[in-house]
């Protein structure tokens, strides 16, 4: 893996981890939660993650500003950090940026889940002729959640190559965490239009809108209000880092509160430029209250994944 540059050093070094664990424990205890469930975390093959980190270090065009990785540790250490925060279940979301990657990424994820009991077996797909077979194969291996990244993959979710994929995922009720908002920069197929058209065709799809659809928050809230199986995750939203570029409209908070049973905790761990505790504090600062936070940080995902 690339060595961290001066500007890319971890936000929270190991000397501060005990203090951070105490902050997260205090957050859980205030809500009466023994544990958290995080539906948006990333574990990948080392060489893939190294390239992702290098991209963030270089502030690539999909990033656009300095983005130091807070948890630049080897794999087992990252797992231990999550467990130390009391995260009882997490994902290994990965995603291809070109054809021919999805199957071997899924094989790696299957192995990772087999050796990591608290990982929710994750998988992915790309708009390519093998997509349906890739997804069918991943489901047969035990995949419980998929990641679809329309910004990085740069494909149309309504591509006919994916018709059987969406049909299968809708039929099985398998959640698909989907980066479909236009943050941090728009893609050719991001925004509420393409995904809204998809949901009109597959209204039973269990779509989880990553980042609350940042920055088109209100439009994606509207899709969740329209389609009863659509959920949203909180990844990076409300943090000072995101508020500086894409503030969540405060007049939309009541709508988010009303959708409380369909909002899930997500963090983007380890690829975040602040601490895990900061992300939880930002959720608390919404003022949506303890029952909402308990549902978001644990109960909704426990119900979704039958934990």
Image (spheres, rainbow, N blue to C red):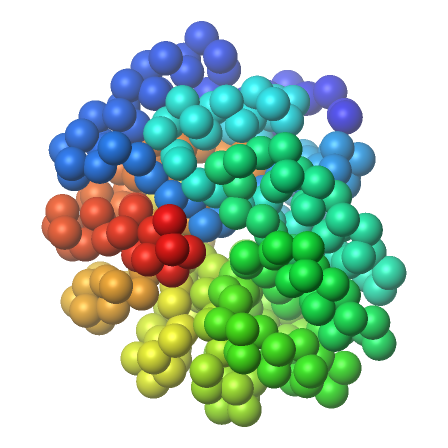
Residue closer to the observer: 301 or 235? 301
Q: Nearer the viewer, residue 295 or 304?
A: 304
Count of marks placed on residues: 0
Identity of the residue furthest to the top in this view = 15
Give the residue at x 50% y 22%.
80
Find residue 305 and report its horizontal and vertical position in percent: 42, 56
Q: Is residue 30 left or right of residue 194?
A: left
Instruction: Please indicate, yes or no, whether residue 286 appears anywhere in the rendered image.
Output: no
Picture coordinates of residue 24, whole percent (x, y): 29, 28
Compared to residue 241, the image places residue 208 above or below, namely below
User: What x and y, as percent, mark residue 217?
Assistant: 38, 68
Looking at the image, residue 123 lies above or below residue 164: above
125 sits left or right of 176 in the view: right
Q: Quadrant of residue 38?
A: top left
Work out whether residue 165 or residue 73 is closer to the camera in this orientation and state it.
Answer: 165
**Residue at x 54% of width, y 79% of height:** 171
* Residue 288 in sight in this render: yes
Query: Which quarter of the figure has residue 112?
Result: top right
* Residue at position x 64%, y 26% in the image: 75
Instruction: From the viewer's side, name the closer residue of 224 and 12.
Output: 224
Residue 72 locus on image (x, y percent)? 60, 25
User: Quarter holding the N terminus?
Assistant: top right
């Amino acid at each position: 893996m690339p060595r961290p540059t001066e500007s890319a050093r971890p936000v929270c070094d190991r000397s501060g981890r005990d203090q951070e664990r105490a902050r997260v424990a205090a957050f859980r205890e205030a809500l009466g939660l023994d544990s958290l469930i995080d539906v948006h975390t990333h574990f990948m093959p080392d060489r893939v993650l190294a390239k992702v980190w290098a991209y963030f270090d270089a502030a690539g065009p999909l990033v656009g500003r300095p983005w130091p990785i807070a948890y630049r540790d080897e794999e087992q250490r990252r797992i231990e950090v999550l467990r130390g925060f009391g995260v009882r279940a997490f994902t290994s979301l990965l995603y291809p940026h070109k054809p021919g990657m999805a199957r071997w990424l899924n094989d790696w994820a299957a192995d990772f889940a087999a050796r990591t009991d608290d990982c929710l077996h994750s998988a992915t797909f790309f708009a390519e002729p093998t997509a349906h077979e890739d997804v069918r194969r991943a489901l047969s291996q035990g995949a419980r959640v998929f990641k679809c990244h329309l910004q990085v993959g740069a494909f149309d979710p309504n591509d006919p190559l994916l018709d059987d994929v969406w049909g299968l995922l809708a039929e099985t009720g398998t959640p698909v965490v989907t980066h479909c908002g236009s943050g941090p920069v728009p893609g050719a197929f991001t925004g509420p239009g393409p995904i809204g058209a998809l949901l009109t065709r597959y209204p039973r799809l269990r779509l989880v809108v990553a980042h609350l659809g940042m920055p088109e928050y209100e439009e994606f809230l509207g899709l969740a209000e329209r389609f009863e199986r659509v959920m949203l995750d909180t990844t990076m939203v409300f943090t000072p880092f995101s508020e500086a570029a894409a503030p969540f409209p405060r007049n939309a908070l009541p709508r988010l509160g009303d959708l409380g049973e369909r909002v899930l905790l997500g963090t983007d761990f380890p690829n975040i430029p602040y601490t895990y505790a900061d992300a939880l504090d930002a959720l608390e600062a919404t003022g949506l209250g303890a029952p909402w936070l308990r549902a978001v940080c644990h109960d909704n995902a426990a119900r979704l994944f039958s934990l």
